Image (cartoon, rainbow, N blue to C red):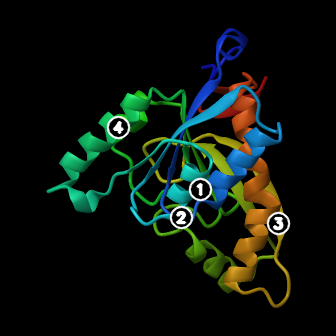
Amino acid sequence: MLISDDTTTKSRKLRILVCVSGGGTNLQAIIDGIGDGRITNAEIVCVISNNKKNYALIRAEENGIPSLSISPKDYADREQFNQAFLDAVNGMQPDLIVLAGFLVVLPEEMTVQYRNRIINIHPSLIPSFCGKGYYGLKVHEKVLERGVKVTGATVHFVDEGTDTGPIILQKAVEVEDGDTPEILQKRVMEQAEWVILPEAIHMIANGKVAVEDGKCRRK
């Protein structure tokens, strides 16, 4: 299955929807990538956060990007939230959904509807330190506990599993003596996450990625 093709990318820009729970550093990397030309043929059409006080929403406002706050806490049950979330996503008509530190489980209907059109950035070299319970600082804590010498980040497509979709890009980062989880997290962001996430989006926006037999290949 082709993610995009030359006809699509030439006719209009790839419409990106970014979902985020934290401060939005990876969102900023995407904004910067579009601004400095590392990402071409793409635009961010909306930012969705599950946290109304999220700094990512301020980043969006400062860059003139529409934003929404949709939280499970605002709905009577998960089913109502899932429907509201999916309605909001569909209303934006995105070509690509980017989970940039989004700590909300996606409705299964959404992963089916947007097959191979949702990507996630994970702060480890999948399949190491991934899956249920491995997110944010917890990943780096486990890396240091295990004593591994090399970690990194992975951009992958999202499927029904947790960190199990086809891998697009990975970048390794060395673990150094004296690292704390916070120091390692910052290095992984700077040396890997902020590099490969814009690169992956650029590849998709320019028809350079295909998924075949559950694996990614470059065109």
Marker disc for residue 88 = 4
Query: Is 70 positioned to the left or the right of 209 in the image?
Result: left
Give the mark toward the camera: 4 or 2.
2
Q: Please say if the residues under marks 1 and 2 sit with CB atoms less than 8 Å apart.
A: yes
Quarter of the image where the C terminus is located:
top right
Q: Relative to residue 58, is residue 84 drawn left or right?
A: left
Q: Secondary structure at mark 4?
A: helix
Structural crowding at the residue carrying mark 4, measured as other residues with C-alpha within 10 Å and reported as few (<14), some (14–19) or many (≥20): some
**Residue designated by label 1:** 59
**Type of amino acid at the residue the image marks with label 4:** Ala
Residue under numbered circle 2: 55
Residue 203, image x and y in percent? 75, 31
Report the Cα–Cα distance between label 4 and label 3: 36 Å
Would you say residue 165 is visible in this rendering? yes
Q: Quadrant of the N terminus?
A: top right
Q: Residue at x 72, y 21 (%)?
A: 207
Q: Which residue is mark 3?
A: 173
- Quadrant of the rendered structure where residue 49 is? bottom left
Is the Cβ of the residue at disc 4 closer than 8 Å to that at disc 3? no
Q: Residue at x 68, y 33 (%)?
A: 216
